[in-house]
Amino acid sequence: MGNSRLYELLHTFSAAEYTAFGKYLRSPYFNHREDILRLFEYYFEKKEARRAGVFDKEKVFAAVFPAEPFDEKKLNYVISFLYQAAQHFLVFNDPALENEAELKRRLAKILRARGLAHQSETALKKAEEALAAGPYRDLRYHRQAHLLYLERFESEARQRRSAVRSFQEMIEESDIHFVAEKLRQGCSAHMYQAVAEAHFHIELLPEALALVERRQWQTLPAVGVYYYAWRALTEADSQTWFEQLREAMHLHLRYFSQAEMRDVYTLAVNYCIRQINTRQGEGLQAFYLRQVFDIYQKGIENELFTENGVLSRFTYKNIANAGLGLKAFDWVEGFLKKYKGALDPKHRESAYVYNLANLHFRRSDYGAVLTLLTQTEFDDVLHQLDARRMILRSYYELGEFSALDSLLDSFQTFLRRRRDVGYLRQNYLNLIRLTKKLLQLPAADSAARHRLRAEVEGAKVLAEREWLLGKLD
């Protein structure tokens, strides 16, 4: 069962969801099978089995069907039924159903269909009040507003021939939601195209932009952030648009759900990183690196980058790297310690060790780098590659040339055996080859040094090019 779809699904449940799911299964309205409940209780009460993630099928069967002979087919049926129950529970427990405005709108629609006009009207008014009182004015708000006006129109149209006001409001909210969603899609597509070298054709985007400008809808929070993001991503002179995006993010932060504003902040970060990578001759790297750092700091302060209390190990690394790029070493050290506990337990220790080693590496504390990295195994191949790169340089800087020779050989073997490192293989193979040449370089042979420098400069792909050139100066 450890590798089953049921285990994979249940493993994503939070502690609160475990408790709620148990109540769900104990309710005869949702479940009338005792064997499903016994299987659930076995799993969640046997903590050692949960940690291992593996069931011994015969032990499980004995717990679910005491005094019956083992029947694997029967057990598989119960596992399948529990899996279906878990899926139904997630739909029933959807946070969207906790939204008062959405609940009352659905209720109004159901009551209207049953001919209970007065009760439907009461529910609809409560839905409108709940939506107006809510804190957000994001994409979801305009979608809900459109649906509410649609329900209002359908309710009024049955009672009188004219329902002009609600119909016009329904159209406007639909248009606002449409253009905001279209701009959001455009921004996402633009970023994906840059990363995946794909091409997406988005119909009606020019019309959406024209409508925003004609109606001045960029003043609306849900439209403005995506409008300015799109302009920043696509205009040649983009810095002014980015500054307007940054101002809109700050101004409208309170109007967005955490999830949507996280996406907006990620768009802004990706824009800045692209500027750093593509405008290297214009002296803007420091400016945009500072913007990335500031965006991450603001996001961390407002808990935008955590989801259900968990911080992605990749975001953890990106935030640390932004601080390291600005030499904010003390801040990074504090950040790594403070947010270590927010990482997924599966990756917590390795992510912390990797980033702490990177901090020591940037501080030129090579002994600490070796202490950390030579005692840790990483499950992420990119971390494995980067750890070997840092160890390589640390051995060189400390004069540990015997250990470096051994590392170069083992690193080369690792790269030749792995098939999941893509284009990075040649970057690191060239680093190994040229480091070996550097080690063999006669100290007084200036001609050999000049030839090696030309080879380093001429390599099409090469990790640590600047470091190698520095050693040849």
Image: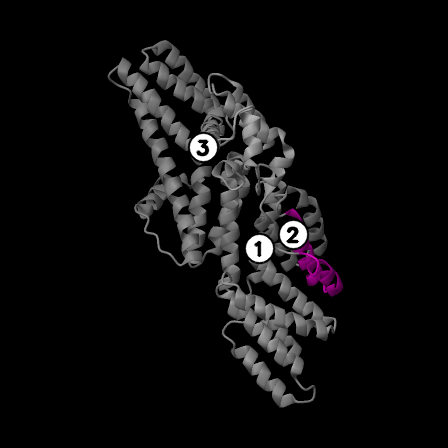
Q: Is residue 274 magenta?
A: no
Q: Position of residue 103 (x, y in %)?
A: 44, 21
> In the picture shown, does residue 313 fall above or below 174?
below
Q: What residue type is labelled 2?
A: Ser
Q: Name the residue under label 3.
A: 73
Q: Mark 2 points at which residue?
A: 350
Task: Say which residue appears at 65% left-offset and 36% top-offset.
Answer: 48
Task: Say which residue appears at 41% left-offset and 28% top-offset.
Answer: 144
Nearest to N terminus: mark 1 or mark 3: 3
Q: What residue type is labelled 3?
A: Lys
Q: Does the magenta stretch include residue 351?
A: yes
Q: Where is residue 183 in the image (x, y as percent from the top left)?
A: 39, 45
Nearest to N terminus: mark 1 or mark 2: 2
Image quadrant in which the C terminus is located = bottom right
Q: Quadrant of residue 108?
A: top left
Q: Name the residue under label 1.
A: 380
Q: In this view, does 367 lie to the left or right of 295?
A: right
